[in-house]
């Protein structure tokens, strides 16, 4: 098995060349990670894979809604470790047929809701083992997972496993072993923590802090943090700084008290604002490093466009050295999956009705629904969006406000700074003070349009191709080389020997 990372950044010649060299008659499976792919790209990719090897099965999965026939043989939504075993047994070991629906919009292909039927939340060990042919570079930020599930259940949230009461945290020794292995083998020091809410339990923060203080190097972490918890539990500030988690994303969503209560975020907006300022002060005094990113939503129940503008002004006045992003509220009408929000399940009960002006709806679609354009304002790829309205606003108002806010930011020279999940990309290339002082406009130009590709992705693709070429040259081969030689290049003792010949394609 081998992994093709950042697959959407490979050109067609590079990808075909690589696949031609590593695939053999024993190749049985292509796996496509869909979480961050555009549907049109995924469809084109799968079509190309089928033309290249029509005999190989294709599975597609991830955390993004799967709402189109993309050409795969099977689709999996959610945490798929358990479901994957069931599918492989069914396809290659005469196992039972997996549980799953066959939606018409997927061309009758099976859709497995892993979160409902093959739960893989409490695995205990979420670590990833990288191999030589992953060509991990020291400047990369890798992903680490401490736990799964969220203790909270915000009404607009479509993510998996909300309201989870059990502690699904990994063990201290497992986490430390993963961090040490990556440092010793690849020089890795920077990570994104994938947990839905890092600070949902003090015990998890204490475990992380203890592990970090035991390491022979200084790591840096970017993570989702719930700011109202740090307000009610101020001791968490010290735990976060001890753990060197200093690049935070806060789902604040609103500074309107009524709207906050309506979505199960009832803390006073004044306390939230004070908590943000206290966090910034603490991190700067303890570590000299801090990046706080806020997510704001236009369209929560009862909140007016005037309230959104007041919130934007507070951010301009008080948060200009940090980062924030606005999105219109999205309510999905998706009904093929168990993991949908309270708003999706019962939007009328929560005060929403459908927009009824066709011209207004069409005008919204023109600037809302994401395809490949960067200027659309839809957050997720969701083609089953409710065009909503409530007592104080509608989706058109929210889309108009977000467009206005982004245009205003541009006119002001994009004063807010590089987001928390991007800032660690520059580790080692610039001094931290320089990185933290740069604006989001620099991030847009230098990361999204080139620097990350030139610094991390292009060298990875080059080394991936050269790694195959070098082995072919050593073996005196002009085309395919034996699967046993490929295994020597990318040996991983944790892979099931029955499925070593599969090929998994990952996007960035």
Image (tube, rainbow, N blue to C red):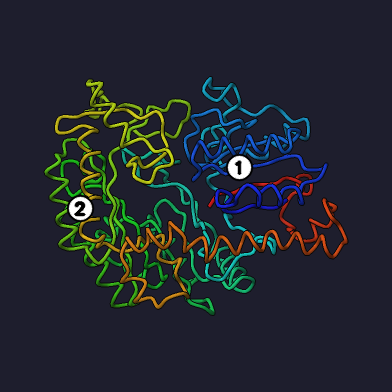
SS at mark 2? helix
Q: In which quarter of the image is residue 285?
A: bottom left
The residue lying at 64 percent from left, 62 percent from top is: 462
Q: In this view, does 213 lie to the left or right of 28?
A: left
The residue lying at 23 percent from left, 50 percent from top is: 407
The residue lying at 37 percent from left, 72 percent from top is: 435
Place of residue 306 in the rendered image (x, y in percent of width and height, measured from the top left): 11, 43
Task: Determine whether 491 is above or below 362 in the image.
Answer: below
SS at mark 1? strand
The local crowd at label 2, few if under 14, some if 14 to 19, many if 20 or more residues have their Cα within 10 Å, is: few
Place of residue 215 in the rendered image (x, y in percent of width and height, measured from the top left): 53, 76
The residue nearer to you, when weighing 126 against 407, is 407
Place of residue 331 in the rendered image (x, y in percent of width and height, measured from the top left): 33, 33
In this figure, which residue is indicated by the disc labeled 1?
32
In this figure, which residue is indicated by the disc labeled 2?
408
Residue extending farthest to the front is 13
Q: Nearer the viewer, mark 2 or mark 1?
A: 2
Task: Determine whether 370 is above or below 145 in the image.
Answer: above
């Amino acid at each position: 098995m081998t992994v093709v990372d950042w697959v959407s950044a490979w050109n067609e010649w590079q990808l075909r060349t690589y696949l031609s060299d590593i695939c053999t008659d024993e190749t049985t499976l292509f796996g496509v990670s869909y979480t961050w792919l555009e549907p049109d790209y995924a469809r084109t990719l799968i079509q190309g894979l089928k033309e290249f090897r029509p005999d190989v099965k294709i599975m597609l999965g991830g955390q993004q809604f799967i709402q189109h026939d993309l050409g795969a043989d099977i689709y999996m939504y959610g945490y798929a470790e358990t479901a994957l075993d069931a599918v492989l047994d069914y396809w290659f070991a005469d196992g039972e047929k997996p549980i799953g629906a066959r939606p018409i919009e997927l061309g009758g292909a099976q859709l497995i809701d892993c979160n409902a039927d093959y739960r893989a939340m409490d695995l205990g060990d979420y670590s990833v083992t990288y191999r030589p042919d992953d060509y991990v570079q020291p400047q990369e930020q890798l992903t680490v997972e401490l736990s799964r599930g969220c203790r909270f259940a915000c009404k607009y949230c479509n993510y998996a496993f909300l309201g989870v009461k059990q502690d699904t945290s990994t063990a201290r020794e497992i986490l430390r072993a993963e961090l040490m292995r990556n440092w010793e083998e690849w020089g890795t020091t920077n990570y994104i923590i994938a947990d839905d809410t890092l600070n949902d339990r003090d015990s998890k923060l204490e475990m992380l802090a203890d592990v970090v203080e035991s390491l022979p190097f200084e790591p840096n972490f970017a993570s989702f943090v719930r700011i109202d918890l740090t307000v009610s539990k101020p001791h968490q500030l010290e735990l976060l700084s001890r753990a060197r988690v200093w690049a935070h994303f806060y789902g604040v969503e609103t500074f309107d008290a009524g709207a906050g209560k309506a979505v199960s975020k009832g803390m006073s907006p004044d306390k939230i604002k004070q908590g943000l300022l206290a966090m910034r002060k603490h991190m700067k005094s303890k570590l000299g490093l801090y990046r706080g990113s806020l997510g704001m939503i236009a369209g929560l129940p009862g909140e007016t466009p005037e309230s959104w503008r007041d919130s934007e002004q507070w951010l301009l006045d008080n948060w200009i050295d940090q980062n924030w992003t606005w999105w219109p509220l999205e309510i999905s009408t998706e009904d093929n999956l168990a993991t949908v929000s309270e708003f999706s399940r019962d939007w009328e009960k929560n005060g929403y009705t459908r927009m009824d002006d066709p011209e207004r709806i069409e005008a919204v679609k023109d600037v809302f629904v994401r395809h490949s354009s960067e200027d659309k304002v839809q957050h997720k790829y969701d083609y089953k969006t409710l065009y909503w309205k409530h007592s104080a606003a509608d989706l058109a108002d929210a889309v108009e406000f977000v467009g206005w806010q982004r245009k205003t930011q541009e006119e002001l020279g994009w004063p807010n700074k590089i987001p928390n999940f991007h800032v660690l990309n520059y580790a080692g290339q610039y001094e931290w003070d320089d990185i933290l002082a740069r604006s989001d406009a620099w991030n847009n130009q230098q990361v999204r349009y080139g620097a990350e590709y030139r610094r991390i992705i292009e060298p990875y693709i080059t080394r991936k191709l050269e790694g195959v070429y070098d082995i072919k040259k050593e073996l005196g081969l002009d085309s395919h080389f034996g699967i046993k030689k490929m295994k020597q290049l990318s040996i991983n003792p944790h892979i099931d020997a029955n499925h070593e010949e599969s090929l998994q394609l990952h996007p960035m």
